[in-house]
Every structure is written in C-alpha cells, then in structure tokens.
Image (cartoon, grey):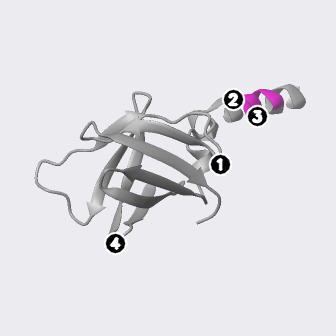
Amino acid sequence: MKRIMLGTCLALFALSPAFAEEPLAAFFGNTLIVKDAKGERKMWYRPDHSYTGVDQGGKKTAGTWDIKDNQICTQRTEPPPEQNHGPHCKPIPTGKKVGDSWDGVNHDGQPVTYRLVAGS
C-alpha cells in the first residue's frame, strides 16, 4: 500500500506545473543573438525569469520575462522604460536548440533574425 501511495504522489508531483518542461530551457546558459535593422544585440535568459542584454555599442538592458497565453512576454526594467511601456509579447520559440536560427518580427513589426549560440 505504501508503494502505491508513494508512486501516486511521485506521479502527481512530476505532472505539476512547476516541473513541466520549461519552454526556454535551451536558452539558459546560452546566448540569444538578435539582429535587426538597428544592429545586433545579445540576450541572456535565466530560469529565475530575468534577462540581461547588451547591444553592439555596449548599451546594457535588463528585465523580466514570463509565459502568458503561449507567448513569451518581456518587461524591461533597465534602463527604465518610458511611461506606459508595457511588456512585449511574442510566440514562444518552441523546439529551439543551440545552433538554430529563425526569423521573426520585433515589437515594431520589423524583421528580426534570432540565433541561439552556446555559452554566455
């Protein structure tokens, strides 16, 4: 009986949202290179739902990220955003791994190329 109870508890524990597969797991410890008409910047996402970044001129940025309605939403905290500057949300880049590149659009609707590279 104890084995059945333990097995049931472990199964429920493994199915809980806290242990569901993290959609950005491949990004942790690696660098996301974002290239658009303004240039290139590097972004680093962390499991604690924070991120940092730097552009080609050395300007740094930081903020938080979250998953909402099957989208990744980022909210910049440094430098402080303009007034009424809400989070930017876009589809979650599922199934990406180190070495992958893909196209998308930025929050202004401009084309962007993303590339996930090993290390930080």
For label 3, the residue is: 10
**Mark nearer the N terminus (2 vs 1):** 2
Q: Residue furthest front?
A: 37
Query: Dot 3 lies on which element?
Result: helix
- Which callout, 2 or 1, points to the residue nearer the camera? 1
C-alpha gap between disc 3 and disc 2 = 5 Å
Image depth: mark 4 or mark 3 in front: 4
User: Hey, which quadrant is residue 94 in on the image?
Assistant: top right
- Distance from disc 4 to disc 1, alpha carbons, whole Å, reads 24 Å
Q: Position of residue 10 (x, y in %)?
A: 76, 34
Q: Front-most of 1 and 26?
A: 26
- Could you tell me residue 91's position as x and y percent? 43, 32
Q: Which residue is mark 4?
A: 57
Three-letter amino acid code of the residue under disc 3: Leu
| Predominant secondary structure, magenta span | helix
Badge 2 marks a residue whose secondary structure is helix
Which residue is pictured at 40% across the width and 59% down the height? Answer: 40
How far apart marks 2 and 1 lie (CA) works out to 35 Å
Which quadrant of the rendered structure holds the N terminus? Answer: top right
Cβ–Cβ under 8 Å for marks 3 and 2: yes
Q: CA distance from mark 2 to mark 4?
A: 49 Å
For badge 1, the amino acid type reads: Gly
Q: Which residues are magenta?
A: 7-11
- Percent coordinates x, y for residue 53 in the rendering: 41, 63
72 lies left or right of 76: right
Residue 12 tag number: 2
